[in-house]
Image (tube, grey):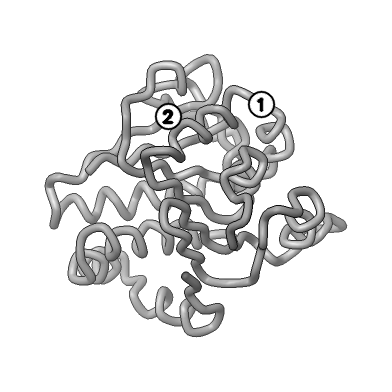
Amino acid sequence: MKFGILLFDGVEPIDLAALGALSIAKRFEPTIETCVISTGEHNKVTLACNVKIDAEFTIKDAPECDVYLIAGGPTWKEEIQREQTLEFIRSKSRSAILGAACMGVTLLAAAGVLDNKKATLRNQTSGTEENPIEYVKRQWPATDPVVAHIVDQGRIVTGGGGVLNLDVALYLLERLYSKELAQNTGRILEYNEAYMANADRLGILK
């Protein structure tokens, strides 16, 4: 199974935690494949804090993946204006699973793939910004944003803020492979207790 990690300029480095989880999972399940995809014109992506990485692909030449995980970051308001990014998400939603956490979820909402679906994202504010859940509710009324650990709507799986992109990856490993694979991955990451605490505190909705 192939996982594509979708990045854009300004993404928070912590959103690469999902990629780290998949890398660990591959030790137990060698059929897992990953690739990094830039939404920009070039492969080079500059993350927040000026971290630079070279994506393997752009959205113009990206391979077909079974799952696309969409990162988030403080530049999400610029990214939701990029029609080529939104069209890529729309086109992949017809055949692949889309996962996102934190502000990456706004890209799903802007693309329209969350219409008439529940979703979650970051529910804590930074500075004077509007609460992200309230923002999504106001900006895209067809979306039903809720506070949760993870929301599973079939082809769309969303997670809460910050490091919960890691939780989305672990959740998908269990759903698509096995509970054993997810727990073995979480064990190596020393994260299983934190995952369960997040699930107990916020809840997993389907």
Report the front residue among 98 and 20.
98
Name the element at disc 2: strand
Q: Position of residue 78 (x, y in %)?
A: 72, 32
Name the element at disc 1: loop
Q: Residue at x 57, y 63 (%)?
A: 160
Front tag of 2 and 1: 1
Disc assigned to residue 148: none
Q: Type of residue at label 2?
A: Ile
What residue did someone put label 2 on? 37
Q: Position of residue 193 (x, y in %)?
A: 37, 80
**Position above or below: 149 against 165:** below
Does label 2 or label 1 sit earlier along the sequence?
A: 2
**Position above or below: 197 against 139:** below
Q: Type of residue at label 1?
A: Arg
What residue did someone put label 1 on? 82
Q: Residue at x 51, y 65 (%)?
A: 151
The answer to whether 203 appears left or right of 132 in the picture is: left
Q: Quadrant of the N terminus?
A: top left
Q: Position of residue 3 (x, y in %)?
A: 32, 41
Q: Residue at x 46, y 40 (%)?
A: 93
Question: Mark 2, residues whose alpha carbon is within 10 Å: few (<14), some, or many (≥20)?
Answer: many
